[in-house]
Image (spheres, grey):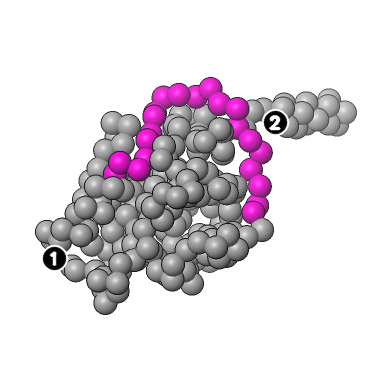
């Protein structure tokens, strides 16, 4: 009785080990082979670090860890300073991403932008290096200000099980060091938003990728991903089942 079950279990593990990776780095892109099939690139920049992060996010039921596949991009030598972050996040079973896609309490210039024919929520905010996942990596490579001006684009997919995040950054100008204007129509922020929108290229529907095995990069802070990840909450469809 038990031997057939052991053989079946071994076969399932073997199949899982041989199954192609679904998400991660492929060439210059961050990709997802399914749910949804997607490729994200930053044409004017070069990927400098990529991997997987599992930060502990505080929730109403304690700490839970999503799985985040990410890539950090930087300009070519001699180009203007800045960086771009791409991220595809998965929640654990029985959880979903919150509908609140804000980046901070001081978000400005909120709106909707299309990438690959789909709507993304857009906000502009300030990233302090003390809270940035990539601060140590940037410091070791001689780049990075104390604060970034950031434009973030976010979309939920697969019934809120998957989150796609794009964030374009430039050093925070001295003229904005005192805080971002909360009213609309600021020319500096409008020009920055346009640069951010043109930084990313997304293609939905492509699913044939050679995905590299994700790594946990030593110079990337797991704790620093909590802001990029955002919030998640229990999926109420799972709360009252007998096996949970």
From the top left corner, tell me how far across and down residue 37 is, in percent.
46, 29
Instruction: Say if 4 sits above or below 76 in the image.
Output: above
Q: Quadrant of residue 116?
A: top left
Residue in front for this viewpoint, 29 or 146: 146
Residue at the image position 64 percent from the left and 28 percent from the top: 20
Residue holding disc 2: 16
From the top left corner, tell me how far across and down residue 186 is, in percent.
15, 61
Q: Is residue 56 visible?
A: no
Q: Quadrant of residue 231?
A: bottom left
Binning the other alpha carbons within 10 Å of mark 1 as few (below 14), some (14 to 19) or many (20 upward) gives: few
Instruction: Say if 13 sits above or below 182 in the image.
Output: above
Q: Quadrant of residue 23?
A: top right
Task: Work out which quarter of the rendered image holds the N terminus and state it.
Answer: top right
Residue numbers of the magenta segment: 197-217
Residue positioned most to the bottom: 178
From the top left corner, tell me how far across and down residue 9 is, in percent.
78, 31
In the image, taking residue 139 as reference, residue 79 lies left or right, namely left
Residue 201 magenta-highlighted: yes
Residue holding disc 1: 183
What secondary structure prevails in the magenta region?
loop
Q: Is residue 38 visible?
A: yes
Rounded to the nearest angstrom, the CA distance separating label 2 from label 1 is 52 Å
Residue at the image position 29 percent from the left and 72 percent from the top: 174
Residue in front for this viewpoint, 152 or 62: 152
The answer to whether marks 2 and 1 mark residues whose Cβ atoms lie closer than 8 Å is no
């Amino acid at each position: 009785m038990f031997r057939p079950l052991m053989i079946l279990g071994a076969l399932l593990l073997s199949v899982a080990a041989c199954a192609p990776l679904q998400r991660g780095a492929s060439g210059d892109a961050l990709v997802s082979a399914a749910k949804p099939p997607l490729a994200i690139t930053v044409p004017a920049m070069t990927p400098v670090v990529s991997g997987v992060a599992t930060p502990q996010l505080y929730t109403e039921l304690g700490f839970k860890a999503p799985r985040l596949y990410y890539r950090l991009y930087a300009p070519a030598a001699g180009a203007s300073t800045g960086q771009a972050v791409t991220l595809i996040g998965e929640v654990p079973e029985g959880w979903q991403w919150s509908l609140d896609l804000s980046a901070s309490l001081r978000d400005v210039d909120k709106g909707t932008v299309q990438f690959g024919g789909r709507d993304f929520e857009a906000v502009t905010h300030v990233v302090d290096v003390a809270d940035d996942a990539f601060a140590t990596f940037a410091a070791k490579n001689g780049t990075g200000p104390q604060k970034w001006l950031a434009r973030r684009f976010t979309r939920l997919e697969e019934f809120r099980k998957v989150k796609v995040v794009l964030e374009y950054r430039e050093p925070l100008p001295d003229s904005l060091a005192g805080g971002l204007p909360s009213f609309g129509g600021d020319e500096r922020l409008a020009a920055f938003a346009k640069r951010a929108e043109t930084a990313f290229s997304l293609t939905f529907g492509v699913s044939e990728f050679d995905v590299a095995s994700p790594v946990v990069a030593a110079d990337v802070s797991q704790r620093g991903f909590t802001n990029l990840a955002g919030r998640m909450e229990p999926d109420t469809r799972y709360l009252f089942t007998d096996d949970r």
